[in-house]
Image (spheres, rainbow, N blue to C red):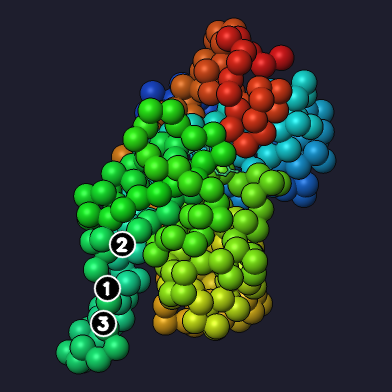
Amino acid sequence: MGKIKVAFFDAKEYDRQSFMNSNKDEEFEILYLETRLSEDTCKLADGYDVVCVFVNDDVNSVVIDKLAAMGVKLIALRCAGYNNVDIEYAYGKIHIVRVPAYSPYAVAEHAMALLLTSIRRIHKAYIRTKDFNFSLNGLTGFDLHGKTVGVVGTGKIGRIFIDICRGFGMRVIAYDKFPAKDSGIEYVTLDELWERSDIISFHCPLTDENRHMVNAESIAKMKKGVALINTSRGALIDSEALLEGIKQRQIGAACLDVYEEESNVFFHDYSNHIVNDDVLARLISMPNVIVTSHQAFLTNEALANIADTTLDNVREFFERDTCTNEVCYKCGKLAQCEQKHEKKCF
Ligand code: NAI
């Protein structure tokens, strides 16, 4: 076979740089497309062997059928989560690979950066001192030392976040659908976590089961003034309920790297536009809300790992009968493939 041809959707400058570094010998022919993958744009992949996508590309059943009909053999996710792919429908039609871990440190450290920024009002102080306003009024924060942090999801990122929190002298409790044995982590029920935590951070995948796990009911169970951190997936939180919780002063701070309607706005410059999403606009207007646009992964180390692993995945798929980072829906858990197959999934 000649060079493997990759249609690379939703390409940003930083993606191009890291993939060009990884592909410096031009082993792969990569077409970088700025547009996202959708039912309308998938025809751009005609004649390509692989489609490479990110978190907001829409890989639904129609897209899968169209790509399969064009002869695309592999969808290479350059991210860990795959809630934007209909993996059940893809089974038997197109193989799916992902990058299970690229830098869990990047995400865990960003979660802590958001928390510190928010509770120590760094975002306010930065703007003030830029304007030579050295007043401290309104900048009072609170110590993290001695506070209880509830961590939802104790996988790679959650565990690193726990270590960071322990370094701050915080007490850690956690909820995981599949608790890690002998980890020394104090697991509690979700209700207990809502009730006891001063800070709650989400590090679990999004599934149909946990969509909107933060809703009016769970918010009512939380401690008054709780700080929420979401670097996982936006739809874990019902944004309207979050906004209401903030207005009621039940939620003291929200640190959001993800947002349930982010695919309409994140990764684009709308500074000269009227943003139509009233909930997002209202959230951003709150002094105790910090939004970053799905930036937690964005470090040099993570980008290099993403590019290397993605191209390794593609190479392995075409050259061997194994497929180390393949995901399919048959391996037990929809949100967290257990990879029971030794070879390709089908
Ligand atoms: P992981 O697979 O190592 O850990 C996920 C953990 O969540 C596992 O321990 C699993 O048992 C647990 N879990 C599964 N379903 C659950 C449920 N319903 N309730 C509670 N826990 C549940 O994943 P990793 O690498 O730690 O990533 C976690 C999440 O972080 C990803 O699913 C992704 O959504 C998000 N992420 C965000 C990034 C960003 O840039 N903001 C970058 C990378 C990942």
- Please, what is the three-letter code of the amino acid marked with disc 1? Phe
Question: Would you name the residue on which mark 1 appears?
Answer: 142
Label 2 – label 1 distance at C-alpha? 9 Å
Q: Residue at x 33, y 42 (%)?
A: 160
Query: Which label belongs to residue 147?
Result: 2
Q: Earlier in the sequence, mark 2 or mark 1?
A: 1
Determine contact: label 2, label 1, CB under 8 Å: yes
Which corner quadrant of the image does residue 7 belong to? top right
Residue 72 quadrant: top right
The label number, if any, that marks residue 140 in the structure image: 3
The residue shown at (21%, 88%) is: 136
> Which amino acid type is shown beneath numbered disc 2?
Lys
- Residue 304 relative to residue 334: left or right: left
Q: Residue 221 vs residue 228: left or right? A: right
Residue 131 is left or right of residue 219, and the answer is left
Quadrant of the drawing holding the C terminus: top right
Helix, strand or loop under label 3: loop
Q: Residues within 10 Å of mark 3 (few under 14, many from 20)?
A: few
The residue at 42%/60% (across/down) is 197
**Above-or-below relation of 214 to 284:** above
**Residue 210 in the image, given as x and y percentages of width and height:** 64, 49
Q: Does residue 291 show up?
A: no
* Residue 36 vs residue 233, the one in the foreground: 233
Residue contact between numbered discs 3 and 1, judged by CB atoms under 8 Å:
yes
Ligand 1 within 8 Å, label 1 CB: no
Q: Residue 79 bears which disc, if any?
A: none
Amino acid at the residue labelled 3: Thr
Q: Residue at x 58, y 70 (%)?
A: 220
> Above or below — where is 46 with respect to 11?
above
